[in-house]
Amino acid sequence: MRNALLTCRLPGLVPYGQALDLQRQLARQRIDGELQDDVLLLLEHEPVVTFGRGSREDTVVAPGSLLASRGIETVEIERGGDVTYHGPGQLVGYPILDLRRYRTDLHWYVRTLEAALIRTLAELDLNAFSVPGLTGVWVGEKGSSETMPLRVAEGAARKIASIGVHVSRWVTWHGVALNVTREPLDNFQLIVPCGIDGVRMTSLASEGVTGDVEAVSASVRRGFAEAFDARIVDLAPEAIPAALRGGGVSQAAVGTPR
C-alpha cells in the first residue's frame, strides 16, 4: 500500500517564524514516532528573506533599511542553499517526510522534489526542467547539457521554483517555493536568488499560466503524489494542533484519501 501524505493548506499569510516552529515540531514528532504519517504543508508567507547554510555576504543587494521599509523580515535558518525570498503570490511547500519510507538518499530526495514540481507544471501546460549542477526548476530555453550554464547566464532559462532542504535522522523539513503571480518578482531583485549571479526569476503568470495560488496548490498535491508514489489525504488546518499534542492527527479533521 502506498504511503499516506497528509496535505494541509494553511490559510492566509503565515509568518515565517510560525511556519518554521511548526515544521520543527512536526519533524521532531516524526523522528520520535509520535506522528505516524508524512505531512505536506502548503502556504503563502508574509514577506521574508531567508539565509541558508551556504549564503554568502554579497548575496543581498539591497541595504537592510530598504528591506525593512518594504516590510521584509530576514531570517537565518538551517536549510541548505543560499539566500531566497518568500512572500505573497508564491506557493511554499514544506514536506515533513521520513525518507526511510522512500530512499535514504538526499540527492534522490532533491531530484524527486524537482520531479514533483515538473509534473505540477506539466499539468498546467508549462514545460519545465531541471538544470545539471543547480537546484530548482526552470522554464524557457533548455539547450543541451553543455550549454545550460550559458542559457542560465543569458536568462534564456528562467527559474520558476526554488528548493532548499534540511534532513535530520532521515526526516525532512524546509522544501520548495513556486512563484505563481508576478508579485514576488520585484523583491527577488533585492537579492542574488539562490546565490546564482545573473539568474532571471519568473512566475506562472509571467509565463502565461492563469490560476491563483489556491488552484495551483491542487496541482502541487497531485505532483507530489505522483513523484513520491504517495496517497494524498487532505488535512484540515485545525488538525495540526492535534498532531502537535501527540497521538497522531484527529481522524475527524482528515479528509478523503486520493
Image (spheres, helix red, strand yellow):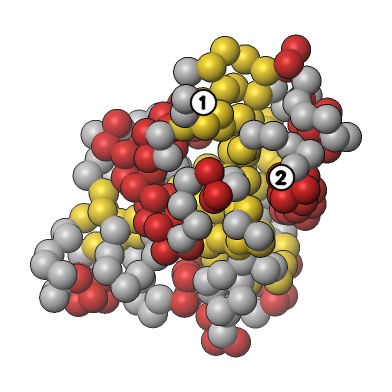
Dot 1: few (<14), some (14–19), or many (≥20) neighbours within 10 Å? many
Dot 2: few (<14), some (14–19), or many (≥20) neighbours within 10 Å? many
Residue, disc 2 = 30
Residue at 12 percent across and 64 percent down: it is 143
Q: Nearer the viewer, mark 1 or mark 2?
A: 2
Name the residue furthest bottom. 57
Residue at 52 percent across and 32 percent down: it is 3
Name which of mark 1 and mark 2 comes first in the sequence.
2
Residue at 70 percent across and 71 percent down: it is 76
Residue, disc 1 = 232
Q: Is residue 27 left or right of residue 145?
A: right
Q: Hey, what amino acid is under mark 1?
A: Ile
Coordinates of residue 240 in the picture (x, y in percent)? 77, 31
Name the residue furthest right. 245
Residue nearest the observer in this picture, 85 or 17:
17
Residue at 72 percent across and 75 percent down: it is 65
Image quarter of residue 237: top right
| Vertical relation: 141 (above or below) 218 | below
Residue nearest the observer in this picture, 38 or 134:
38
Label 2, secondary structure: give it.
Answer: helix
Label 1, secondary structure: give it.
Answer: strand
Residue nearest the observer in this picture, 42 or 206:
42
Coordinates of residue 147 in the picture (x, y in percent)? 14, 74
Q: Hey, what amino acid is under mark 2?
A: Arg
